[in-house]
Image (cartoon, helix red, strand yellow):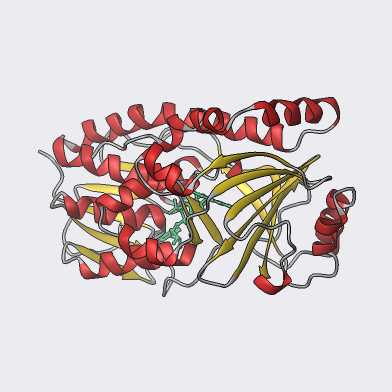
Amino acid sequence: MPVEHAAIIGAGIAGLTAALALAKRGISSDIFEQAPDLAEVGAGLQLSPNASRVLAELGVLDGLTKLWLEPQSIRLISGSSLRELAAVPAGNFARNRWGAPYGVLHRKTLQKALLDAVVANPLCSLHLGIRFESDLPQGRRPADVTIGADGVWSRLRQAIPDAPAPRFSGNVAFRFTLAEAEAPGFLNRTSVSALLGSSAHMVCYPLKETDGFNMVAITAGNIAPQAWLGQPTQAQQELLQSRFRRWHPAISGLLTGRKDITFWPLFETTVGKWQDGNKTVLIGDAAHAMMPFAAQGAAMAIEDAFELSAFLATRPVGEAIALFERHRMPRIAKLRQRGAFNRFAYHASGPIRLGRDIVLSLKPPQSLAADLDWIYGYRAIG
Ligand SMILES: Cc1cc2nc3c(=O)[nH]c(=O)nc-3n(C[C@H](O)[C@H](O)[C@H](O)COP(=O)(O)OP(=O)(O)OC[C@H]3O[C@@H](n4cnc5c(N)ncnc54)[C@H](O)[C@@H]3O)c2cc1C
């Protein structure tokens, strides 16, 4: 018998989307979230058409498009010369080519839109300040399926033999925001700019909600990841300065003396089982936290939630979660490969960098877009 009621652990992007997608199919849920309120965590997010298409199906996209920015392009720029190497068209081009919009927004904007829809839906019961440890908390009724949407440090994983495990990726992110008035001219106000340099890259885009730019620098770093979301220590500051020392002074100058930079060691998960063959399944970062080199982590959480719900609505639970795992794993593996390739290309130096720059400059926009069709043109089953 298909599922009638679900327990969801975690009210992040994956958990809230799952609750809405299940409700759309008439399935009720209890969502258990450890945080006492859903505070404003995270920073900017790029949401590609494969994800925004799902949000449209769930009725939350219209509200978001009023708040987000639809960039005209994703520009790849040399970090040493500030020369534009290539630009993937977005804006109306994205709507036409991939059938849904590409937007940039603050994570809290997306989470609030999902949260408002969940709270308004009588099939969804959200329980804040309830942390799952080992036994399922009391919900409104017994659950036919338990969905672990509890992020990279998932606790529900312990219920699944051979589940993925978290590991430090060897990469660190530095984040800060730049007020519109402070932003240098090379930061285009209508585009996402990815500045590429040896061993590091920096992604910058305007956030309409904050009147400033979201800035994220990602670099290799073996500094013991003792801090999570903290102010950088002296060693972390030095790492950041050294990585950007040979970049164009307009970029390295942006980092000098800043007090508002936060440091994020980046964790990913190993490959493992996402379901127990019975009634427990992982989605989003709990199943497959990945590096942000393809900017697809939240998008995959959204696709996961939507497709899992479709399977749960039409099949017995054991069959549905096994099918979910079989169906989603190849796409996630391919995205991880794309992320690894992007890391190699973005952080290249010497002759590889020269080759990269030539190849990128010769690629027409249509060809750059065609390389992304399998990611952005994907239509989640639902
Ligand atoms: C630097 C950086 C840039 C990124 N940029 C992008 C981007 O541009 N586009 C994109 O698509 N993705 C991006 N991502 C990835 C994206 O942020 C994540 O993949 C996404 O937020 C994962 O969502 P989630 O719901 O699976 O997990 P989370 O957001 O981690 O949510 C998990 C939730 O579960 C709760 N929880 C945890 N444990 C328990 C427990 N035991 N009991 C109850 N509740 C619990 C947590 O409090 C939390 O609310 C980026 C990531 C990083 C680090």
User: In the drawing, does residue 307 fall left or right of residue 330?
Assistant: left
Is 191 rendered above or below residue 340?
below
Residue 238, quarter of picture: bottom right
Q: Residue at x 32, y 54 (%)?
A: 17
Q: Residue at x 49, y 37 (%)?
A: 164
Q: How many marks?
A: 0
Is 128 rendered above or below residue 240?
below
**Rendered location of residue 367, percent (x, y):** 54, 27
Assign the N terminus to one quadrant of the image: top left
Residue 210, quarter of picture: bottom right
User: In the drawing, does residue 291 fall left or right of residue 237?
Assistant: left
Q: Residue at x 43, y 26 (%)?
A: 330
Assign the C terminus to one quadrant of the image: top left
Q: Residue at x 37, y 34 (%)?
A: 378
User: In the drawing, does residue 108 fall left or right of residue 214?
Assistant: left
**Rendered location of residue 222, percent (x, y):** 78, 46
User: In the drawing, does residue 76 fall left or right of residue 366?
Assistant: right
Looking at this view, is 353 or 337 the one in front?
Answer: 353
- Is residue 282 visible in the rendered structure shown here? no
Is 108 rendered above or below residue 9?
below
**Rendered location of residue 310, percent (x, y):** 22, 40
